[in-house]
Image (cartoon, rainbow, N blue to C red):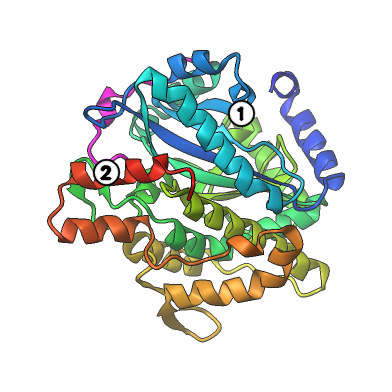
Amino acid sequence: MGDEQRLSPAEQIARAREEFENATDFTIAVEEEFALLDPESLDLTNRFEEVQAAAADTALAEHLVGELIASEVEIRTGRQETFADVPAVMAERRSQLQSLVEPMGILLGATGTHPWADWKKQRIIDTPHYRRNDELLRYVVWRNNTFGLHVHVAIRGADRALAVMSAMRNFLPEILALSASSPFVEGVNSGLHTVRTQIFTRFFPRCGVPDAFASWAEYERFVRFLYETGSITEHTQIWWSVRPHLAFPTVEIRIADGQPDLGEAQALAAFAASLVARVARAYDQGEPIEPLPHRLIEENFWRAIRYGLPGELLDFDRGEPIPARQRLEELIGWVFPVAEEIGAAPYLAVPEQNATERQLERLEDGAALEEIYAEQVQATERIGG
């Protein structure tokens, strides 16, 4: 990060393009965000700095970072050469984090939102990056007490990376529906399957579904324009749900809710990585996926937010809605050969119920939010799957 901060925006963009041109296809990294919780109340607790200090002399130190609020922590797999290596590392990072925080009297939550925590009681961590975002965004950043899972997939070739990113826009609703884990916020049932998505993508600027870009040159012109007009001061202030990352030669999928269950987190990462690889293969075979118009993706985006995995998504080839589960199973069939190639195939699965469905079923059975969330925290503790 230090080298990046010393580079001018033009130098950063030029270096990013060079790194994309020389990237190794389909190396993978996964990032998971967790809530830091008081073990008695299960409320958010502002203790990130203590967690970071405790990690300083451990194997986890280089893989643990802050993420906006002091009641949140992010762990990273780091670059893995193939997806086959990713699931074990995800399990290891979770285990390392739990071993770190347990003696400190901290529990971990991994649903996309905390069901009742008061955002006004959360503190922004004191780093230059987050101080800048605090000054820039104010209420928007204060309100963003959310927890997600991000997947980075390296793509060789700058123009190819932009083609993959533009096509991956089409599949954001499917990834979101699969990942939904956040029906509750501010002590109420939101009526949505992923209220996290509304809080984050609808509040932040330059967020949600981006436009499609025809080439790296077109994308670079836009990024330069943002810098030159003072719209951004860091490239990470482009918060799109899928983006080319300027610090790593990856297409980053940022749409998913956090996952309490490790097995479902691994399956979600496998699905996202396989989609990226399959889209890249289609491009290589001269049959690139045509980016859908923004207005059509937004229709499915809303369906995923509101109705999630039990709902329907629009099939634009058929011209009609189909069950979201059917759509996901069809996509798994489409990506399966490439998933086998990158080592993701054994992890591809659509659960009988995802985290939101389980929580809503418990609510219907009469369970209180506190009881439901405690069950999600217990699920996060189960590293064995």
Q: Position of residue 221 (x, y in %)?
A: 72, 44
On the image, numbered disc 2 is attached to which residue?
373
Q: Residue at x 60, y 27 (%)?
A: 233
Identify which amino acid the numbered label 2 is placed on: Tyr
Identify which amino acid the numbered label 1 is placed on: His
- In this view, the residue in front, 53 or 262, is 262
Placement of the N terminus among the 4 image quadrants: top right
CA gap, disc 1 to disc 2? 27 Å
Q: Are marks 1 and 2 in contact (CB under 8 Å)?
A: no
Q: Position of residue 171 (x, y in %)?
A: 56, 64
Q: Residue at x 43, y 62 (%)?
A: 177
Magenta residues?
110-127
- In this view, the residue in front, 229 or 315, is 315
Q: Residue at x 61, y 48 (%)?
A: 87
Q: Is residue 128 visible?
A: yes
On the image, numbered disc 1 is attached to which residue?
63
For this view, does 347 lie left or right of residue 355?
right
Queried whether the magenta region covers residue 115, the answer comes back as: yes
